[in-house]
Image (cartoon, rainbow, N blue to C red):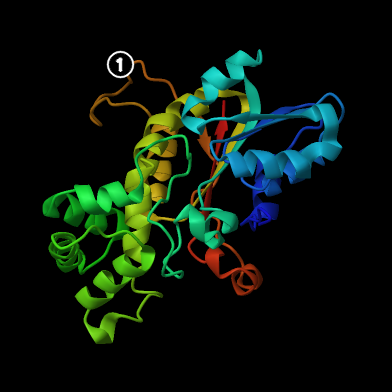
């Protein structure tokens, strides 16, 4: 199956990135190479684009898509959490811009054997962004205790019926392990009252999202990486981050605000004595949202938010 991914907020992201023809840019979530191709098309022969992704399918597909740009492109397999180390390996210490698109790719969602989908009954419970890791979604569904499952589904899925869903899973696996998307979906559906099942999309959407986030440590990785990525930017460099989950957006918003105003002195102090210096400016005081046309063309864009920070 061809690796496809609709690059959400693509034009807005490139506009805010302010690509310099001779600059060095990093796409930390390379995916199908949509954002990367737009950046690369604006680079001269002196410019450089480094694409990073932990998904082998993405690395392969992006390599094919970006091949026409020749030596301007370097693709590395890894997690953006290790961006500084990966860049150091190829002799780069500072960059002019960074892009992160935190959405799951269309390929991952539409390829049943990857286990991200709830729409194919016999799909395995996998959900690994990086198939080199051994732990899968099935390990969470069948191994976590009731309270752990409840916490994950409540916090990461923002699911109001998390407690009953967790209870249904624990009860079902006493008979046999929950092994497929269809089995899990039925347990979720049975836990949600009929009048609520079709509110906010497919009834399994929030629970599957929660398990995926937990498995891949998505929020933890993001929160621990932002300060370091801001530190990689050259003066005037920008980081553009597209989120699809309220908790992701909150993490980015908070990190950008703290980077802009890091002072921890009490408000009554006449001058700052903590010594913490602003790293730059939050460019987007409010998140940039997809336009109506994009939302019509790509329903997966509806929850997307773009935030941008510029380094001093």
Indicate the position of residue 256 as horizontal and vertical percent values. Answer: 44, 37
237 vs 207, nearest the viewer = 207
**Would you say 70 lies left or right of 190 here?**
right
Q: Secondary structure at mark 1?
A: loop
Instruction: Report the number of discs.
Output: 1
Residue 279 seen in render: no
* Badge 1: residue crowd in 10 Å (few <14, some 14–19, many ≥20): few
**Would you say 288 lies left or right of 3 here?**
left
Quarter of the image for residue 153 reads bottom left
Indicate the position of residue 110 as horizontal and vertical percent values. Answer: 55, 62
Residue 170 seen in render: yes
**159 above or below 245?**
below
Indicate the position of residue 31 as horizontal and vertical percent values. Answer: 61, 46
127 vs 275, nearest the viewer = 127
- Taking the view exactly as shown, the residue that stands out farthest to the front is 176
Indicate the position of residue 51 as horizontal and vertical percent values. Answer: 65, 34
262 vs 83, nearest the viewer = 83
**18 above or below 312?**
below
Q: Residue shown at 37%/19% (left/top)?
A: 276
**Would you say 31 lies left or right of 212 here?**
right
Q: Residue shown at 48%/63% (left/top)?
A: 303
Figure quadrant of the C terminus: top right
**Would you say 186 lies left or right of 230 here?**
left
**90 above or below 68?**
above
Residue under pointer 1:
273
């Amino acid at each position: 199956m061809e690796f496809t991914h609709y690059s959400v907020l693509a034009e807005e992201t490139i506009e805010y990135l302010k690509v310099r023809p001779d600059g060095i840019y990093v796409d930390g979530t390379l995916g199908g190479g949509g954002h990367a191709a737009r950046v690369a098309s604006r680079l001269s022969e002196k410019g450089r684009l480094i694409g990073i992704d932990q998904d082998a399918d993405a690395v392969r597909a992006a390599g094919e898509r970006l091949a026409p740009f020749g030596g301007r492109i370097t693709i590395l397999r890894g997690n953006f959490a290790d961006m500084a180390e990966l860049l150091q390996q190829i002799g780069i210490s500072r960059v002019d811009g960074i892009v992160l698109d935190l959405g799951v790719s269309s390929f991952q969602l539409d390829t049943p054997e990857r286990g991200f989908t709830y729409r194919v009954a016999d799909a395995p419970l996998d959900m690994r962004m990086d198939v080199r890791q051994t732990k899968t979604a099935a390990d969470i569904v069948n191994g976590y205790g009731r309270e752990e499952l409840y916490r994950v589904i409540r916090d990461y899925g923002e699911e109001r019926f998390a407690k009953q869903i967790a209870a249904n899973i624990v009860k079902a696996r006493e008979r046999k392990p929950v092994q497929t998307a269809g089995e899990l979906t039925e347990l979720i559906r049975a836990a949600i009252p009929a009048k609520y099942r079709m509110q906010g999309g497919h009834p399994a959407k929030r629970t599957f999202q929660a398990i995926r986030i937990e498995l891949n440590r998505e929020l933890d990785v993001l929160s621990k990486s932002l300060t370091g990525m801001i530190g990689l930017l050259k003066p005037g460099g920008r980081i553009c981050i597209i989120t699809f989950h309220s908790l992701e957006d909150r993490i980015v918003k908070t990190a950008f605000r703290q980077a802009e105003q890091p002072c921890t002195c009490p408000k009554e102090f006449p001058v700052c004595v903590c010594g913490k210096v602003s790293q730059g400016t939050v460019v987007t005081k409010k998140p940039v949202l997809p336009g109506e046309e994009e939302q019509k063309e790509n329903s997966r864009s509806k929850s997307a938010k773009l935030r941008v920070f510029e380094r001093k």
